[in-house]
Image (cartoon, helix red, strand yellow):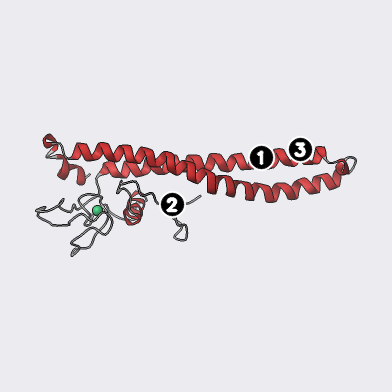
Amino acid sequence: MSFDDPNDVRFRPEDGCPIFSQSLEDHIVAVSRGGQPNAGRFCGNCYTPIGRETEMCPHCRETCDPEGRSGRAPVDAVPGEMLEVLRRQRAIESKWVNSFAYLGIVIAAVTGIAIVLWLPFFRDRLIWATLFYGVYLLIGSRVLPAILGGYYGDRIGFEKARAETRAAWDEWVVERDQPHASNGQSSMTKA
Ligand SMILES: [Zn+2]
């Protein structure tokens, strides 16, 4: 299951954590796949990709003053830590989606057998029973994983992953503002 289908509008939380905007997620995915260098101009707060002339981040509304006179100065690369946070978020999400999808297949297989054994009609009618089970499995193993994985797995996985991302973000915000990490901003953004 892909998260990058442009038609797939994902549930977006309003929880005060600015990570990740869709354009930042797209950028990191492209970087991870080696299709794009991790370079450009990014909001100094939420790392959303911004244009040369952008004065205010469209995602978190941080001022994008190059001198950092107000707000955080834009950066020229997304910190490696944020790449790792997104990688972990997506790993958790797909784990839940896939687990629920497999559960759907198991349920289809088991309920199919149960119906065949339970309905008196299928007794002594092996061909009909086989035929029914084949069709039931064919449909059930598509529909159930789509419902369980695509809906429930996606919801639950997103909540779990989002909680980790929020925690990582809170930690990151504290860490990047620590005075002794003054060399961190430039060295980490080059990562
Ligand atoms: Zn921003």
Q: Amino acid at mark 1?
A: Ile
Asked whether, in this view, residue 7 is left or right of residue 138, the answer is left
Question: Given the current orientation, which residue lies at the most extreme bottom position?
Answer: 53
* Residue corresponding to mark 2: 11
- Crowding at dot 3, Cα within 10 Å, few <14 / some 14-19 / many 20+, comes out as few
* Badge 3 element: helix
* Badge 2 element: loop
Q: Nearer the viewer, mark 1 or mark 2?
A: 2
* Residue corresponding to mark 1: 107
Q: Position of residue 37 (x, y in %)?
A: 28, 54
Asked whether, in this view, residue 181 is left or right of residue 4, the answer is left
Asked whether, in this view, residue 113 is left or right of residue 89, the answer is right
* Badge 1 element: helix
Q: Amino acid at mark 2?
A: Phe
Label 1 to label 2: alpha-carbon separation: 27 Å
Q: Is residue 168 above or below residue 76?
A: above
Label 1 vs 2, first from the N-terminus? 2
Asked whether, in this view, residue 87 is left or right of residue 180, the answer is right
* Residue corresponding to mark 3: 114
Residue sitting at x 68%, y 48%? 140
Label 2 to label 3: alpha-carbon separation: 36 Å
Q: Amino acid at mark 3?
A: Ala
Q: Position of residue 79 (x, y in %)?
A: 24, 45
Label 1 close to label 3 by CB (< 8 Å)? no
Cβ at disc 3 under 8 Å from ligand 1: no
Residue sitting at x 20%, y 36%? 175
Q: Position of residue 5 (x, y in %)?
A: 46, 57
Q: Position of residue 120 (x, y in %)?
A: 87, 40
Q: Quadrant of residue 114?
A: top right
